[in-house]
Amino acid sequence: MSRAKILQPDLVLGDIVIHLTPSLIQKYNLKGLVLDVDETLVPWKEKQLSPELIEWVTEVKQVTDLWLVSNNLSQSRISNIASSLDLPFIFGAAKPSRRKLRQAVTAMNHPLEQVAMVGDRLFTDVLAGNRLGMFTILVEPMVETGGKKKFSLRNFEVWLSQKLGVSLYKS
Ligand SMILES: [Mg+2]
């Protein structure tokens, strides 16, 4: 597998996660979604879940299994978010490592290609999912409105991935 292939999302949503609709999930025949947490579901440091996100999770739960798999080392942050959404979770996952991500996928008990890794980052979420043979979905980051523009590692990853031949046009 070329370097580009391993970073290539199967689906580039081109929008934040709540636009991943039940009909899209069914179109790709996905039985499970593993969701990244920081900037995929919730902006950095934000603790409150938006009503739109809660509504999205409630709807999506009816068509697919959900797990949260986060690299965040704060068990309290991730467990609070997971319990508000009533979802199983793993924190400190060290993506792109496959080890903890595999635990979630194994627990879901669906074929790997029918479980999607959904995240905002190419070098952690997409890379980990592709290394495991999952379906991978890149979403736009959930950021605070009016947040200050700063150097973004994500933007750097997008730039570098495109240099390597990854296509990041909205699918
Ligand atoms: Mg993230």
Image: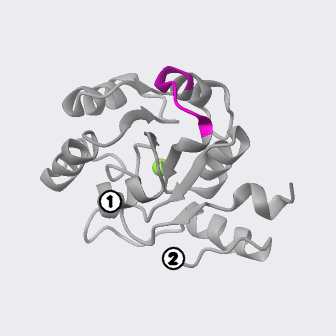
- In the structure shown, which secondary structural element does the residue marked by tag 2 occupy? loop
- Residue at coordinates 42% horizontally, 73% vertically from top-left? 149
In front: label 2 or label 1 = 1
Q: Against 154, is 103 above or below? A: above
Label 1 is placed on what type of residue?
Ser
Locate the N terminus and report the quarter of the image it occupies: bottom right
The quadrant where residue 142 appears: bottom left
| The residue positioned farthest toward the left in the image shown | 51
Expressed as whole percent of the image width and height from the top left, the position of residue 65 reads: 37, 34
Is residue 115 found left or right of 77 in the rendered image? right
Near mark 2 (Cα within 10 A), the count class, few <14, some 14-19 or many ≥20, is: few
Query: Mark 2 highlights which residue?
Result: 170
Label 2 is placed on what type of residue?
Lys
Query: Mark 1 highlights which residue?
Result: 23
- Residue at coordinates 45% horizontally, 67% vertically from top-left? 13
Q: Distance between the residues labelled 2 and 1?
A: 17 Å
> Are the residues tagged 2 and 1 within 8 Å (C-beta)?
no
Expressed as whole percent of the image width and height from the top left, the position of residue 163 reads: 77, 76
- In the structure shown, which secondary structural element does the residue marked by tag 1 occupy? helix
Residue 111 belongs to the span the image colors magenta = yes
Judging depth in this view, the residue of 68 and 106 nearest the camera is: 106
Expressed as whole percent of the image width and height from the top left, the position of residue 26 reads: 39, 53
Is residue 91 found left or right of 63 in the rendered image? right
Near mark 1 (Cα within 10 A), the count class, few <14, some 14-19 or many ≥20, is: few
- Please give the range of residues in magenta: 106-112
> Looking at mark 1, is its residue's CB closer than 8 Å to ligand 1?
no
Is residue 125 found left or right of 1 in the rendered image? left
Q: Residue 97 carries which label?
A: none
